[in-house]
Image (cartoon, rainbow, N blue to C red):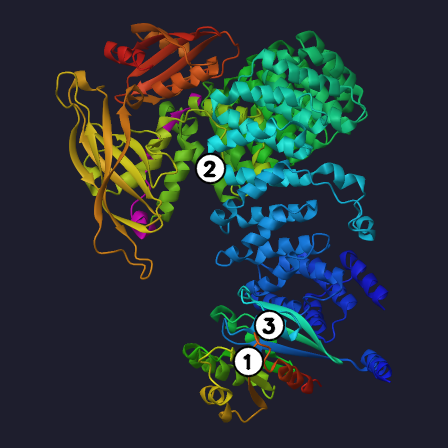
Amino acid sequence: MSWFWNFYEFILSLFWSSEMDITLLGLQNAGKTSLLRVLGGGEFTSDSIPTIGFSMKRVRKGRVNIKCWDLGGQPRFRSMWERYCKGVNAILFIVDSADPATLQIARMEFEALISKPSLEGIPVLVLGNKNDLPDAYDVDSVIDIMNLKAVDDREVSCYSISAKERTNVDAVLSWLVSKAS
Amino acid sequence: MSYKKNEDLDSGPGGAVMDKMTVFQDCIAGFNASPIQPRKCRVLLTKLTYLLSTGDTFARDESTRLFFSITKLFQHKDIALRQMVYLVIKELATSADDVIMVTSSIMKDTTVGSDVVYRPNAIRTLARIIDASTIQAIERLIKTAIVDKHPIVSSAALISSYHLLPVSREVVRRWANETQDTVLAQKPFPQAAYGGTASGLGIGPAGPASSFMTQYHALGLLYQLRSHDRMALIKMIQQLANAGSAMKSPAAIVMLIRFVARAIDEDRNMRRPLYTLLEGWLKHKSDMVNFEAAKTILEMRDSTDAEASPAINVLQLFLSSPRFVSRFAAIRILNRFAMIRPQNVNVCNIDIEALINDPNRSIATYAITTLLKTGNEASVDRLMKQITGFMNDISDEFKIIVVDAIRSLCLKFPSKQASMLSFLSGVLRDEGGYEFKRAVIEAMFDLIKFVPDSKEEALSYLCEFIEDCEFTKLAVRILHLLGEEGPSTAHPTKYIRYIYNRVVLENAIVRAAAVTALSKFSLIDDASVQESVKVLLTRCLDDPDDEVRDRAAMALRLSATEKPIAKEYLAPESVPSLGALEQQLILYVTGGPDAASVAFDISSVPFISKDQAVADQFRAKTMATLPILGGTAIDSGSGAGSGGVSPSKTPALGEDYAQKYAASLAKIPELQAFGALIRSSRPVPLTESETEYVITGIKHLYKEHLVLQFDVQNTLPDTVLEDVSVIANPSTADDGTEPYVEEFIIAIPRLTQESTGTIYVAFTRPSGEEHAYTGGVFSNTLRFTSKEIDPNTGEPEEEGYEDEYQVEDIEIGVADFLVPTYVGNFQHMWDQLSFETSETYSLAGVGSLSEACSSVIDSLSMQPLEGSETPLQNATHVLKLFARTLQGGKVVALVRMAYSAKTGVTLKISVRAEDERVAQMVVGGIA
């Protein structure tokens, strides 16, 4: 009967497919573009070039069509994050958990972002990427460093992932799908 | 639904108001909607393009909002929407902030397969949004696109590179190899690539396949990349010209021909080999190429008869072509050539006569005007009759061409002036715009000036014209002329009536001009005339306009005074040099409160005699009407960043340079003691223009001193120069003494990176009569302390090192002691002066008479007279020159020259001056 269920899913998707927007933010070299590639089912590559501005990619998970806005992390683009976050279903904030030096800057940028009135209430998922590297922080340390416990006006989750090893990538997708309206 | 929207849009240009703010709001709402409705968005984008292209602009923040909402449409699968998005982003790229945001997204679209229809759009848009800091990121991408086998992708990349030149020349320069490959690559349009879309784009299968437009685009870019390096350019031209059939695109060859024209113009030595190329192109199978080659040959300065004749033959064949456009192009080129060398176009006369009745009026006009120039005296009357026949059928623009032709004809055949004058007065009565009427009036002015017999009649035609003239400017000019010429005619009273009529009937400007003209009649030696002029002027005192009353009052007052004084004010012999006057006034007005505290000093403006003013006017006029030889319309072809090559080869008057520098020199306290600046030379480059330090030298001569001015440009981006000075060592004279003694150096304390500064070195000139014209050679060394800039801090390092830099010598020669001056009558001057010296020279390396002329004029710095600077024949020529020495003495030179292919130019120069030494010096000045 499985073919029937597949067919049923397909018919459902024709009528009930839903569309959602998310943005991927984070400092440069946190792994946003690589993660997006992996989310979309592509292979991990380590030689991707820095994103200038933004790039958009669609990811399909079950009946949900996710439009992912991958924004450049260099300082010159950070002022434009807010524009692309307005009205999205969820924000993915990616940090490099193996690079302590940048984590403090990431925290400042993160706090500046969530304090914007226009982005009130949008759920945020903080991802500590690159947990395959030897001295990466674990998920609790990332929560501490990013001071996530202090955020009380919205839903905040935090996963420790590795785009390279595909660790927890499916969990990220499931989290996203759960935010589809 | 959407059809209806389209209809709305169509009515946009007609009358239905497309409100900017409504469109703006609709766009913001429409683009942010989710999911995206491609059809609706396309309509909105089209409206936006319509607004932008009809001149509406959005404020910066509105543009930015629009731009960011449009970025939401990216990566939509609707192809037409993607193309529209790119079109609009290109428009908004200049007015919105942060357009760099879309770089990554566009780059995705530029790397897709070359058969995707929006790839060229993406490439073109990319070039508009990129800035210098990110251009490296797209370097590889553009390179790949340039060599793409699809012509449209390749063209898009080439044109984008062209636009990127101002952004970063260095990066684009690295694409030269790819561009070079593309010039000769043949990229046919893939027949089936677009499938159904090809017809949708309006591209037939045959059209683009045979155009090879990429070659044209690639060549244009390659030229820009090499334009700094003349040798590389010549190499490129020769390589491409010899590539034979690999150059498929006629447009590319036409452009190549223009480059050839420029190369010939810049480097005489390249003339012979390049001419052979041009001759080859005359036989090319494309008309376009034939025309361009013929045009270039005929526009070459001093082309010989043998060189011109193949080009004329080719054009002659086109004269009987069945196509309008070919006939038009051919006759137009011949017409221009006929202005300069009518005798060479004679051979085509039969074909040209057949074109007089051409159904296309433009062709017919050109045919007639060409015949007017090439024809002999006998055919003039017949032609005039034919012109009168269709004068009413042609537009003003062509009427002006006809009138210009008639004007030059008048000067050529003065005996025909009666019929031509009646023709001119006839067309003057016709309907016509200002430009046309002005051309007619100018033609009549010239007649009056150069054909004295026609004066009375022409003046009376003009009087008649101003009776009913709607153009104030023309009326004023005619009144001025009547004032100038009227009093010296046989019946001056006749004109007084016409002039006074203007005072009664016209507006204030014309009335004022009429009063001035009238006042000149009061100088006539006839008591009754004087009396009636006085009565008329008295009546003008009641005029409602201030200016008219003032002029009348002044004229009345003056006419009551002594005759010489009245004459000086009413009809002065000399007038201020208008260019200089304007410049001085601008300096005065912009000088701030200090300058305004003293009255403007009119005596600082040089005065020129009336003869000279007339000659200057005449020269300006001939320059404007004659096609300037050698100056082709190449600039329109080469576009951005083309270094303007000035076609003007006329030697500028020495005083022009002195005027230019006098103000800046006067500001330097050390130099003020030297008195007035007598002469400044033209700037001479002392280094190659691409070196680290670019230096130009200018010589300023004072009564007893010489000042060398060095303009130093530091082109290094990361070095500061300190204590920059020039050590100029004068040569020693034959007797071991140093005629020039250095006084002081004004150095540049600090010359920052990529800036320009000026150094002055002052000398005392040799004193005494016998040494007044002693020349000298100065060897110059730039001396400075060089300090590198620390890239981290942007501050120059503490420690620098001293360095020297040898630059070219400056020579003080004959040319520096002479000031080219205009004089009306050469023969008169020649007869006046007594000391004569002559010498014969043979110039082996000089290839033509005109080259010899310009080199003689240059090295003597004398003013050519009676238009003798352009030789009319190829074998012999007489050049007449005049100048004044720094002390004001007159120098006349008569240079007879002969040319033969074997021995080059032989010339005999005879100089007459007030002083034997001067004469000898000038004779010796030709080196």
Q: Earlier in the sequence, mark 1 or mark 3?
A: 3
In percent of width and height, residue B271 lies at 52, 20
* Horizontal side of residue B57 vs B833, given as left or right: right
Q: Which residue lies under the disc numbered 1?
A: A93
Q: Secondary structure at mark 3?
A: strand
Q: Chain of mark 3?
A: A
**For discs 2 and 1, the disc positioned in front in the rendered view:** 1
Label 1, label 3: how far apart the Cα atoms are: 11 Å
Q: Which residues are magenta?
A: B592-611
Near-viewer residue (B360 or B443): B360
* Occupied quadrant, residue B761: top left
Question: Which amino acid type is marked by label 1?
Answer: Phe
Q: Which residue lies under the disc numbered 3?
A: A70
* Occupied quadrant, residue B27: bottom right
CB contact under 8 Å: marks 2 and 3: no
* Horizontal side of residue B133 vs B709, given as left or right: right
Q: Which residue lies under the disc numbered 2?
A: B228
Label 2, label 3: how far apart the Cα atoms are: 43 Å
Q: Secondary structure at mark 1?
A: strand
In percent of width and height, residue B190 lies at 76, 45
Assess whether residue B603 is covered by the magenta stretch.
yes
Near-viewer residue (B364 or B184): B184
- Residue A5 to residue B346: above or below: below
Label 2, label 1: how far apart the Cα atoms are: 50 Å
Assess whether residue A74 is covered by the magenta stretch.
no
CB contact under 8 Å: marks 1 and 3: no
